[in-house]
Each structure stands twice: as structure tokens, then as C-alpha cells.
Amino acid sequence: MNLLQQVKTLVYKDIVLEWRSKYAINGILLYVVSTVFVCYQAFKSVDTLVWNALFWIILLFASINAISRSFVQESPYRQLYYYTIANPKAVILAKIIYNTLVMILLSIIAFTSYSITFNTPIGDPTLYLVAVLLGSMSFASVFTMVSGISAKTGNNSTIMAVLSFPVIIPLLIVLIKLSQNAMNGLDRAISTGEILVLLAINVITIAISLLLFPYLWRD
Amino acid sequence: MRKSWWKILALILVGGTIVAGLLGPVPSLFLLHETIRNVYFHVPMWASMVILYFISVIYSIKYLGSGKTEHDLIAVEAVNTGIMFCFMGLLTGMLWANITWGEPWPNDPKLNGSAIATLMYLAYLVLRNALEEEQKRAKISAIYNIFAFPIMIVLIYILPKLTDSLHPGSGGNGTFGDLDMNNNMRPIFYSAVIGWTLIGVWIATLRYRLRLIENKKNQID
């Protein structure tokens, strides 16, 4: 099998595994919705600046929870089996693609429930949706690699947070700026710079992940 | 003597720039006045930090290729020394900011970026402590090191240029080199950068050799 086919099969495998139990996805969706509701109860109504920041914080913690398990949910023996039949590049690429799909689903549900409860007018909804999609893609690409690293170190959750927060902050700054532009309904030409920076960071992280993952899995 | 010429050069350069930096003539500028002398001490810290981190990344890449313990030791000691320079850079910067901007830590992308980059390299050290087995520790921390370096560059040099920043050289401000430094300052500045970088490399090599001796002592023959 060539790389593309392997990736396709592995993504399909991940989706089927998830669909069979539906445990992880339902848990994480419930997590998002209840966090949104807790925030709603605590804040009642907020101005646009806080609204935007709060949304990204909720999404950040939900995505850490969702992605940190991506390399530990299957047993090490089964992982070993995958590595014997598939290219390590295909394994990491499949994980990134699967996590991106999960994150898109997650962020759309978070966004819907969030905007229904808080009901704040958005100046440019299409651009905001683009920001959310780019954000879920970036979270997936960065956290997948970091979760691969932290999976190797036993005590998972602390290391995951310590390693991933500094790495995600530059992305988060650009994302918050882009979505704030969308909230204020500014002209789209202003935001092209941010979109390009996000895409560039994504390309760089995915390229580095592809280069480094073959060294990571070999024990 | 043949091997230690660069150490003597480092001492002469750093000693000379401390004297010339504190006593030499500087242009009297609006707002900056004598604080422009900080450019001799603050900027070289960051320059040597980036060079040390770069050395560390090179040896991390080499480690992944070769699997030699020595390469891993050089990588970690370069980061350790780099973190020391980073803290000195933060301190000299805060000293200057307190006088020029009125507070030691204004909310500025360049400052926050450098703080986050520091956190990232401290996380690298935490990651090393979390792993017990030596080869696994070397490999996984090398991977994180390579992963973190481009993000550090983005944080310190690229993001502040895109947004509004108080710091010279970012957010549309000119650097001191373009605007404020006159030709008396330039040679002192460049020799300070070279001198402090050499001192940093020297400290890193000393630490590396200490590690080698420790390793040898712990070995069972």
C-alpha cells in the first residue's frame, strides 16, 4: 500500500473504533456543553472581548482533553502491530487528520451551543467560522505531536499541559486576534495576514511532525 | 595556548566592552539618554541565547541520527546555559524598561513572547526529569527540542513584528541599529555580541566536560 492508502485506512480504522464505543466522543461533547453552561451560569452576559476569549479557552481545554488520549487509548501491543504494517508517517498523518475531524465536530458543537446560550451578535459570521475551523486544525496538528511525546512519559496529563501550552500560545494569540476582527465585522482584507500566518504555522508543525515522528515511535 | 585563543579573545572582548560600554561616548538622545548603553548588555544576552539554543538543536538532530550520548549531553548543556542567558536578558531588559517605559513589565508582545519561550525551554527540562531511562530521555527530549525551536523563533522574532510593540525592532519600530546608534557604538556593540556568545559557548563546554567526568565516574568497569 502506498502512503495515501495507508492514511485512508488508518483514519477509517480510527473512525470505526470510535463509532463502535462512542465513549470518547460523547464524553468530550458533554464536557464542552457542560463547560459552556457553567460559563453561562457564571457570566450571564458578557461583552464581545470576554465572549471571544472565553470561547477560545473552552475550546483549548476541550481539545487538550480530546487529543491527549490519541496515543494511549490503544494498547502498546496493538500500536506495535500498526507500526509493523504501516509507515510511521502514515500513522502520524492519520492521527492528525482524525483529530482534525474530531476537533471540527467539537468546535462546531461548542460554537453552536455557545452562541445560543450567550447570544452575542457577530459582525462577520463566515469569517468567524473560518477562524474556528483554522483553530481546530491548528489545535489538532500541534496537540497530536505533543500527545505523541507525552504518551512516552508515563505520567501523562501534567506533561501534556506543560509541553503544549507554551507551544500553542502563539497560535492562540493569532486566533484570538483573527476572531476578534470577525466579531467586530472588520473588512476581510485586514485579516488575510493572520490567516496566512496560521496556515504557515500549520504547515510547519505538520512538516516537523512528519519528520520527527519516525524517531519517536521506535523504542 | 593554541586551543584556548578564543577563550582569551572572549575575556578581552567582554572586559573591553564592559569598560567601553560604561565609559565610552554615546549620542545624547531624547528619552533614552544614557540608557542606550544597555544595548551593549541586553542584546548580546539574547543573541548568545539564540545561538546556544541553535547549537542545542543541531546536536539534537545529530543525536537522532547517531544515538551518541555525547550529542545529547551537548544539547542539554547548551539549553541550560541558554536559559541562564535568557534570565539575564530578561533582567537587563526589565531594568531598562523600568526607566524608559516606567514599569518593568508592560504588556507587550515581545516581552510576553520571550517569557513564553522561556517557559517552553523550562518545559524541556521538566520533560527530561520526567523520563527515567537514559536513551529514551535523550531521544524524546531531542524531538521536543527540535519541535520547540521554530516556535521559539516565531514567538520572539516574528509575532512581535506583526503586532504593535513598544520594543525597539518590532511592531514597526526601527531597531537601535537603524536609528540611534552612531558609528562610535557599533564596534563596541558587535564585539559585545561576539564576546558574550563566546563566553556562553565556553560555559556550555565546561558544563559538558563536567557531565562527561560524572558519567565516567558513574560507570562500572
Image: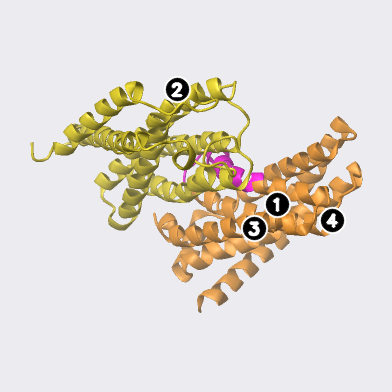
Chain colours: A orange, B yellow
Residue at mark 2: B34
Label 2 vs label 3, nearer the camera: 2
Residue at mark 1: A24
The stretch of residues the image draws in magenta is A152-173
At horizontal 54% and vertical 44% (from top left) the residue drawn is B155
Residue A35 lies, in percent from the top left, at 79, 39
Q: Amino acid at mark 4?
A: Pro
Mark 3–mark 4 distance (CA, rounded to whole Å)? 24 Å
Indicate whether residue B85 is drawn in magenta.
no
Residue at mark 4: A125
B3 with respect to B125 (left or right): left
Disc 3 element: helix
Label 3 packing within 10 angstroms: few (<14), some (14-19), many (20+): many
At horizontal 68% and vertical 42% (from top left) the residue drawn is A61
Residue at mark 3: A99
Label 2 vs label 4, nearer the camera: 2
